[in-house]
Image (cartoon, rainbow, N blue to C red):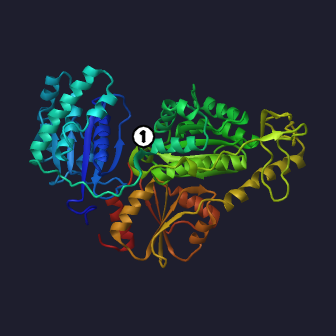
Amino acid sequence: MEKVHAPGSEVTISFCAAAGLGLQTAEDLARQMLTKAGYYVFSTREYMSRVRGGNNSTQIRVSRKPVRAYVDRIDWLFALSPQLRPNITENITDDTKILGDASAMGQEIASLGRTMIDLDLAKRASDLGSPKFSSMIVAGFIAGIFMLGEDSADTLIEKRFKDPDLSDKNKKAFRVGYGLGVDHVGGTPVLQVPDKPDNDEVFLDGNSAVALGAASAGCNYITAYPMSPGTGVFTFFAKNAKLFSAVVEQVEDEISAINMVVGAAYAGARAMTTTSGGGFVLMCEGLSLAGITETPVVVHLAQRPGPATGLATRTEQADLELALYAGHGEFPRALYAPVNVESAFRIAGQAFHTAHKYQVQSVILTDQYLLDTGYDVRRPDPSSVPAPIPPVRTDIDYKRYAFPAEGEYVSPFGVPGYGEGFVSFDSHEHTEDAHITEDRTLRKNMVDKRLKKKEALKSEALPPIVIGPENYDTVVVCWGSVFEPLKEAMEILGSRNTVLVACEQVYPISEELCRIMKSPFRKIFVEGNATGQFSRVVRSQTGIGADELILKYNGFQFTVEELVAKLGSLLGVKS
């Protein structure tokens, strides 16, 4: 198979350690140092569902060009804890340098038919005062092999460890590792720093991007019952609540979370709740309440494998149909699926704009891989997000559910206390002034009124991202986080008659996607689920679905190499 990168252009580093040993600290420091030094950096993490123990891993791709996807290849493996899992061991090759503590890992590495470089971490960390210093030694070693300078992490360490004594000890551990790294490469960095253009770039992960996009759209009220992988967006808001002027409520369950959001939105807040699949199921009745009351709310649904608890900390794209059909009765909604970090920022803002413009419910579908992945992006511009739509000032004759004038889709949205009108709210079918009714004609008219919004939602649906030649005979369709690894795979394959179509809005689908689907070309859908859910949704709206499917549903994300192999096989392109 053709390599994902040219020799000398990229280095891939993987860390493996039990939860509680400071793996995230080592990753964060290494990533920040390398970004500051001028490299292009991509990082992602996977973790087991436990507070301590197990064996978690992080991948950092360090490159002389932009990189945005997970790869199988491991150039440097820092193995700090026993019981490496197959997602790591299967990708160790003769070219992989394995480093760690021989006393802890030597026998296991030998059983794999490999040799390791002994950093004697246990003794070195013990000499410094704690086993946890092993991760800081590793961070120093990485700085050493890139020749970043032994003081390259001082400011970062001081920021992370406020206690001066603890900060000094971590600096010592870092310098121990740095010296080992420099000695190992003989004073020549493993990768030269690229000539990077002077762009206004920052390192941003999916969690931060969703939160910043929502905040830029005016989100000032957020609720959640913590549930991985959706908690990161909530904690980002909690850390920055004062900056965002936001109310942040950790509640007792997901039923409370959705109902509080509906109530806050009724009162005029720009409200969002964040959850995962199991929590979203509990929100269905509240979502239906928002549907009949035409209350604009946003739900961030961070997908993970089910059914039930499934794989609580893994990734999958299997909740699309859940989001589409959630809530009893029939009412319109908009479903979005960010394809990368920049998209996550922009789509979060779009979700709020749509919810408030059409008084509907927007669902943002992400997944663990997207949320826990980060790389260099142009600094997001909050002013690019549509400005909040203010409520109307009500008059004495205000009717919350007045039938819209010809050519319009929504009733005037007023909030209590802003104007002279009485702003009512009811979960039953209602009259224009929100009184309960069982009039069958009025019932039909109210249903038609709500469903008519779907026409506008479809007319304004985001067109897909289309990458490839103008003349083609094959369309490769994806949605959400599959985009970046698939894009890189297709660049490697270099097929001249194939286009990539990536969808950020998955319901209603755009007229442009409908046109593409109705074309006579071959259609291959790539999805992170077992049944081709997006293909089925597209078929339900166009009558045409996938000719072939590439699916993955083992709890892990697609890698560039496996997409090169699977797509190359379907396209008849040798890699």
Is residue 541 at all visible to an observer of this figure?
A: yes
**Residue at the bottom extreme?**
471
Q: Amino acid at mark 1?
A: Leu
Label 1: which secondary element: loop
Residue in front for this viewpoint, 207 or 483: 207
Image label count: 1
Q: Kindly indicate the quadrant of the structure image that contains residue 495.
A: bottom left
**Residue at the front extreme?**
198
Relative to 154, residue 291 above or below:
below
The x, y position of residue 219, in whole percent, is: 60, 39
Residue in front for this viewpoint, 141 or 552: 141
Q: Residue at left 43%, top 37%? A: 312
Q: Residue at left 57%, top 49%? A: 383
Is residue 115 at all visible to an observer of this figure?
A: no
**Disc 1 marks which residue?**
311
The x, y position of residue 353, in whole percent, is: 65, 49
Specify the quadrant that holds the N terminus.
bottom left
Relative to 558, residue 477 above or below:
below
Specify the quadrant that holds the C terminus.
bottom left
Q: Residue at left 52%, top 41%? A: 211
- Horizontal side of residue 225 vs 484, given as left or right: right
The x, y position of residue 544, in whole percent, is: 58, 68
Q: Residues within 10 Å of mark 1 (few under 14, many from 20)?
A: some
- Horizontal side of residue 37 vs 487, given as left or right: left
The x, y position of residue 505, in whole percent, is: 58, 56
Q: Residue at left 44%, top 73%? A: 498
